[in-house]
Amino acid sequence: MKLVYRPEIDGLRAIAVGAVILYHAQITIFGVQPFKGGFIGVDIFFVISGYLITSIILKELLTTGLFSFKYFYERRIRRILPALLFVMLISLPFAWMVLLPTSFLDFSKSILYSLGFSSNFYFHYSGQQYGAENGLLKPFLHTWSLSVEEQYYVLFPVVLLVSFKYFRKYLVHILVVGFIISLGIAEWTSRNYPSISFYFIHTRMWELIAGSILAYFEITLGYRSKNQTLNLLLPGIGLFLIGHSILFFNDEMFHPSFYTLSPVIGVCLIIWFANRDELITKLLSTKLFVGIGLISYSLYLWHYPIFAFNRITFFTNANPLMEIFLMSSLLIISISSYLFVEKPFRNRNFSVTKIFKIIFLIFGVLTLFLSYSIYKNGKLNKNNINLEKVKSSPLYRASCKFSSSNSDFLNDVFFKKEFLECKKKYDKFILILGDSHSIDLYNAVSKISKKDEFIIGLNKRGCRPSNKSANNCHYNNALKFIKKFNRNIKYIFFTHKGSYFLTNFHASSKKNLSDSRLRKLPLDMVQFNSTINYLKLVTKINPKLIFIGPHLEPNIELNYKSITNFLNKKINFIDNTNYDLKKVDRELKNVTKINNIKYLSKIDILDYNFNKDFIVDGNFTFSDTDHWSEFGELYFGKRLIYNSIIKDILFP
């Protein structure tokens, strides 16, 4: 009994891979990312895989009464490994050229785990949150889904074979119970252990089983839906559910969970009710959709490393023409990969012996080289060893030293749990509040402070107190948090890019920043006014707030290309700061004094000078135009702390 080719399934694959690519491309239209739910493309793939794999196994069992594990896994190997190994092999020299040692070490480990189809475990245990900004720089993060599928291919045939042989009458019941249990676990785990829920197979299995249930009914009944009315209506509803999920889901929702039922049901409706006379089936069966579906595996494999290397090297640098070139290149490479790698290896005329020889050769080369890379801690490229000195530091974590970039941190299960545990232990804590620049401060203070100091950071990149939406920024929730735990707060350190807003405005010329006339001021001053008013509110609750400024901005574009050119002595860095830091500092002193806000001047304490402080002992103190590097956090942090009242706070 041979599987009947269904072109609309390839059409569904096209939608799935298109959604994932659009999501990872972070396409923005009028300041909005319309495809924030594109990650559900993976869920579409899971349902399709469950349907097809179960169809293959059950049809073989019903036709022959037997199941060949050898033939089954040979097909899986032909389908998955050659293209995957090819992408890894081609990506390796690019990774060696552009990845810094720490990133190359992570790259090496991720590929080795991917070769063992366990990269989902690696990314979870390495603390990689899917959808996070740093994840976009990991070339093989997307292989977590391949690992989940392969784990399913190992477990499911055994379960299905045993159930078919000994509990055939209850096979569908076993599938339904498995679906319900896995979905229930996914719902609970997403709310309590979101990373585990996202990456692990037991919370994804229900999506694959959904397809398996469809395959069971189709094979046992000998047909799919015969109801003409439903056949005409339900595929459209299915496509609507999928489209709605792609456009309206987002990274902050619980996933996979009951919410994920929406796209999964959508896929199931199309698979079950699709027929040749129905519009959606015709659309998905067009050459365009089928063509993209056929190359969907290659597209999926290639898009993530290409996007990651592009972001690391600033290749397109937000240039529309370059981005079109990149997407065109992705398409050409994927078509070539399908024609010259996927198809030949899936051809039965290509002997399995030759395939295994090629696979083992590439597998061996990758394993040996990447194992050596791990042994050397990723330090294989001298140029990149120097480049790593410029890198920005990740959020520092230690016992009772943690930060949240979640806007709604008050409802964050992990934040609550850790905070309450540390509060019982220490009672008093230091709060560090602000935008990405407060991350620099949080890291510096946390690293330099005593081991038993309780420090919390509420630091969300790009946020201003003028943003009243709690969904986007954390300041309103921070105010609630300060009110609730005011008794426990020793000090509040606040810093952000706000001093930049004084660039084109003389703040000291306004005696009262709360004056209604300020509503007519330019946006920069409105932003600054909102910051001062917010700090006044905080100060009324806790007068131990300290505003630390001004914002230091050498305004140097530090990226892979510029640093490489500098190290190769092709360019010199010049301070491009477009405003007078000392003047801004004077304005801040005046404004904070008028409004009874404690102000700590970086200018007075650090005595910052570009020529003296930008590169120290061969180390860059900044990681980009205005953020401190890992070295800079300690270099500036020690001077800031030991030469100010912060020293007495941290070391009384």
Image: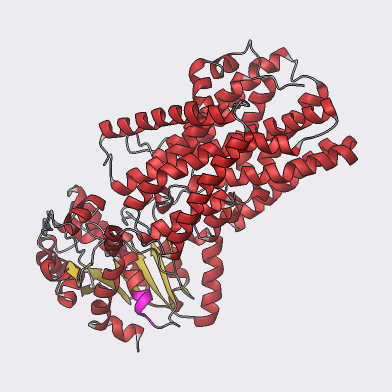
Q: Position of residue 544 (x, y in %)?
A: 33, 77
- The quarter of the picture where the C terminus appears is bottom left
Nearer to us in this view, 19 or 386: 386
Which picture quadrant has residue 158? top right
From which residue to which does the magenta span run? 445-450
Which picture quadrant has residue 268? top right
Q: Position of residue 349 (x, y in %)?
A: 61, 25
In the picture provided, is 239 more to the left or to the right than 586? right
Nearer to us in this view, 23 or 510: 23
Q: Position of residue 176 (x, y in %)?
A: 78, 39
Q: Is residue 437 magenta?
A: no
Main SS category, magenta section: helix
Q: Is residue 446 magenta?
A: yes
Q: Residue at x 59, y 49 (%)?
A: 117
Q: Residue at x 73, y 30 (%)?
A: 56
In the picture provided, is 158 more to the left or to the right than 467? right
In the picture provided, is 233 more to the left or to the right than 16? right
- The quarter of the picture where the N terminus appears is top right
Q: Residue at x 72, y 38 (%)?
A: 70
Which residue in the rendered view is the most extreme toward the top? 277
Asked whether residue 539 appears in the rendered view, the answer is: no
Q: Does residue 335 sit above or below 513 in this rendering?
A: above
Which picture quadrant has residue 386? bottom left
Q: Does residue 522 sit above or below 344 in this rendering?
A: below
Which residue in the rendered view is the most extreme toward the bottom? 652
Q: Position of residue 552 (x, y in %)?
A: 19, 64
Q: How is the image coloured?
A: secondary structure
Query: How many discs appear?
Result: 0
Q: Does residue 63 sit above or below 180 in this rendering?
A: above
Asked whether residue 121 appears in the rendered view, the answer is: yes
